[in-house]
Amino acid sequence: MRASFVALMGCACLAASAWAGLERYPLETHLLPNGLRVVLAPDTASPAVHLAVWYRVGSADDRPGHTGVAYLMERLTWRATGPGGSEDRGARVQAAGGVPTSLTTADYTCFQEVLPPEQLEVGLAVEADRMAALAAGEEDLRAVRAQVVEHIRQRGNQPVARGLDRLVELAFARHPYAQAVVGRAEDVEPVTLEECRAYHRRHYGPSNAVITLTGAFAPGSALAQVRARFGAIPR
């Protein structure tokens, strides 16, 4: 009985500590006219700012016979072809002292940058460019498609990965969650640039996205920057 009481009190203390920690992060939520939702959680104790853009699309939205497109698009949107040739958007973030990452799940695709506070504008510019249009060209698609196909084949040579994929297939039979996030090589190889552009138009718009900002930033200034960068992107 005493041990159970001590354990219960310990859990209560942990919960109280967690709740007290949440009070450090006053949340603000804003909805732009184009449907983009913005969530701000400033933290004066943080040395950096974390920017994330979440799109409500993932591997569960891939159609049968077109698996892996969500994952391919995650990788492809880091590339942009302009007058000076192909550009790696992640390199722009790194040049500003930031760390870029991204991930695809069954339910969402997320792009993130951890940046020095004074370089927030760089991350916002990169993400606004990504949302506004798919700037990748044919050469970018060929390179990224080859990388994805190779990743799929390497994963197929890993017994643990194969076992996990099979487990998910059995657990979610006749459900889109049964599809592997990376897809199948035979589905990814024929994907065209026009298909990717159409996918971007359907899923990467502001009304299908949420921006979260946490860390060292001034809410008023940051919101003004978000409005300036994203406000004109059509719904």
Image (tube, rainbow, N blue to C red):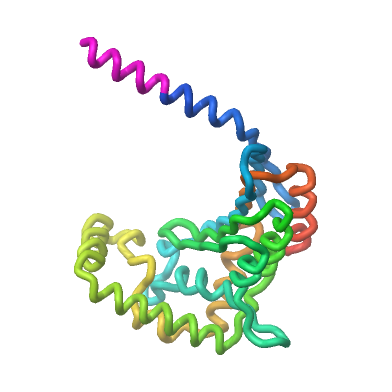
Q: Nearer the viewer, residue 44 or 111?
A: 44
Is the residue 23 above or below the residue 156 in the image? above
Label tally? 0
Q: Residue at x 24, y 16 (%)?
A: 4
Quarter of the image for residue 229 reads bottom right
**Left or right of 107 on screen, residue 47:** right
| Residue 12, position as x, y percentages in the image | 40, 19
Question: Residue 6 lies in magenta, yes or no?
Answer: yes
**Left or right of 155 on screen, residue 47:** right
Is the residue 224 above or below the residue 186 in the image? above
| Residue 136, position as x, y percentages in the image | 61, 80
Q: Nearer the viewer, residue 141 or 159?
A: 159
**Left or right of 14 on screen, residue 33:** right
Q: Residue at x 45, y 56 (%)?
A: 107
Taking the view exactly as shown, the residue that stands out farthest to the top is 2
Q: Nearer the viewer, residue 43 or 70?
A: 43
Q: Residue at x 36, y 61 (%)?
A: 176
Q: Is residue 130 visible?
A: no
Majority secondary structure of magenta residues: helix
Is the residue 203 above or below the residue 83 in the image? above
Q: Residue at x 70, y 44 (%)?
A: 30
Quadrant housing the N terminus: top left
Quadrant housing the C terminus: bottom right
Q: Which residues are magenta?
A: 1-13
**Left or right of 103 on screen, residue 163:** left
| Residue 36, position as x, y percentages in the image | 67, 53
| Residue 29, position as x, y percentages in the image | 67, 41
Question: Residue 55 lies in magenta, yes or no?
Answer: no
